[in-house]
Image (cartoon, helix red, strand yellow):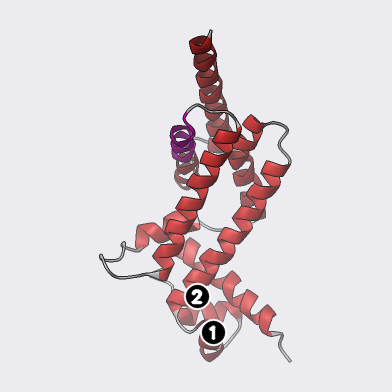
Amino acid sequence: MANPQHTRDRILDAAEMLFFSEGIATTGVDRVAASAGVAIVTLYKHFGSKDNLLREVLSRRLEAWTRHWDEAVAGAGSADERLLAVFDAVETFRASAGPTQWCCFLATASERPAPEEGRTDPVFDLIRQDTQEVTDRLARLAREAGCQDPAATASVLLLLYNGVLSSLLRGAPSDPTALARSTARSILETRAGRASAARS
């Protein structure tokens, strides 16, 4: 008898690969079911709809990304390194993730319009959650690193982080993560120098 969790994981794996290599709108649930080796009725039994399937794919992806970021932060040797660990996490996450075209959240946002005012969209809510969690965590790490304006520092790092994800899709520059990390370090060092000069 098939293990329901294994079946569910196979469907999620197939959906993630197809949605983010061939496109969400162009990938039907029949194609996902066929790739996962299950009947369409089985897919609907587990997820109910394509939107629910997409949301579960994104939710699983967010959990995996958060684990990588947690590990990168835990392995950092200083407050500055913990702040820069977001770029280390991108590297380890990409190495472990399946073959996808680019950031699943940016890809979904590019295909899915924001809901009209007064209407809810659980998928778009998850996109907002991802953005908010990244922003909040960068701001908290910036505070712990002693940045004078943690919110502004978080915004700059978020801009660099988004640039890395977009550059991975474009294919240039060739090593955007290392470049973004070194740029972020230079910004932190410059701001720290100015803060020290202002106090002296």
Residue 70 on image: x %, y %? 66, 49
Name the residue carrying label 2.
53
Residue 98 appears in view? no
- Lateral position of residue 28 relative to residue 35, left or right: left
Q: Magenta stretch: dominant SS?
A: helix
Q: Residues within 10 Å of mark 1 (few under 14, many from 20)?
A: many
For the magenta stretch, what is the residue range?
149-160
The amino acid sitting under disc 1 is Leu
Residue 89 appears in view? yes
Front residue of this view, candidates 100 and 46 = 46
Instruction: Report the residue at 30% width, 66% height from top.
Output: 115
Rendered position, 110 above or below 17: above
How many tags in the picture?
2
Name the residue carrying label 1.
43
Query: Which quadrant of the view contains residue 137?
Result: top right
Circle 2 — which element? helix
> Would residue 156 be counted in the magenta stretch?
yes
Residue projecting furthest to the front: 199
